[in-house]
Amino acid sequence: MPSIWRGQQYAALPVAEVDGELRVLLVTSRETHRWVIPKGWAEEDLTPSGLAAKEAFEEAGAIGEITAEPVGCYSYSKRLKDGSHVTCDVEVFRMTVERLLPEWPERGQRERQWFTPERAAEQVAEAELIDLLRSLAASAPDR
């Protein structure tokens, strides 16, 4: 019988201007090594945006200013340790990256890389996240 429980996660969309152009920082997932944005489960002592900022630090070594309100959301199917799947709803908070640390908690478990918003949209798998990245690309000023 399928589970009707849905998970709630919060994510950072780390962005910065690199060489005069908007870039998005993606990280690889630990198990499948797919490109994703930093995200995690809610924690009692953190606001949703605070949790997103914490995940950006832990997963990507990114430090910066994060929006208080989400800029979008998406859903995906997360595989749990027992092999089952749960649908997760993810609220996304934009983070303007001010600094990337050379060492960070999950450095040995993940890769990180800057992409243009268009290229980032090609790297991720979730349709709603692709749409969010494409809208970011459309709103970027031409240079």
Image: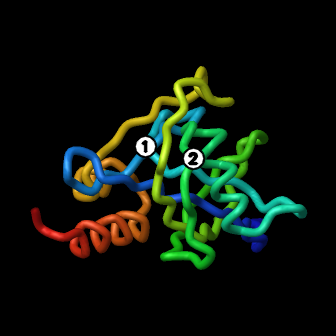
* Label 2 secondary element: strand
Q: Residues within 10 Å of mark 1 (few under 14, many from 20)?
A: many
The disc, 2 or 1, on the residue closer to the chain's N-terminal end is 1
Left or right of residue 79, residue 102 in this image:
left
On the image, the x and y values in percent for residue 131 come to 34, 71
Residue type for callout 1: Trp
Q: Quadrant of residue 52?
A: bottom right
The image quadrant that residue 87 belongs to is: bottom right
Residue identifier under label 2: 63
Q: Residues within 10 Å of mark 2 (few under 14, many from 20)?
A: some
The residue nearer to you, when weighing 120 against 15, is 15
Here the colouring is rainbow
Q: Position of residue 123 (x, y in %)?
A: 32, 48
Name the residue: 45% across, 40% down: 34
**Residue that appears at 51% across and 70% down:** 74
Which image quadrant: the C terminus? bottom left
Element assignment for label 1 = strand
Residue sitting at 73 percent across and 66 percent down? 7
Amino acid tagged 2: Ile
Say left or right for 118 vs 103: left
Residue reaching furthest to the right: 44
Residue 32, percent across and down? 52, 35
Q: Which mark is residue 35?
A: 1
Work out whether 40 lies above or below 29.
below
Task: Identify the residue at horizontal 59%, vertical 48% (top origin).
Answer: 56
Figure quadrant of the N terminus? bottom right
In this picture, is 111 found above or below 48?
Answer: above
In the rendered image, residue 24, in percent from the top left (x then y), is placed at 36, 52
Classify residue 104 as left or right of residue 81. left
Q: Nearer the viewer, mark 2 or mark 1?
A: 2
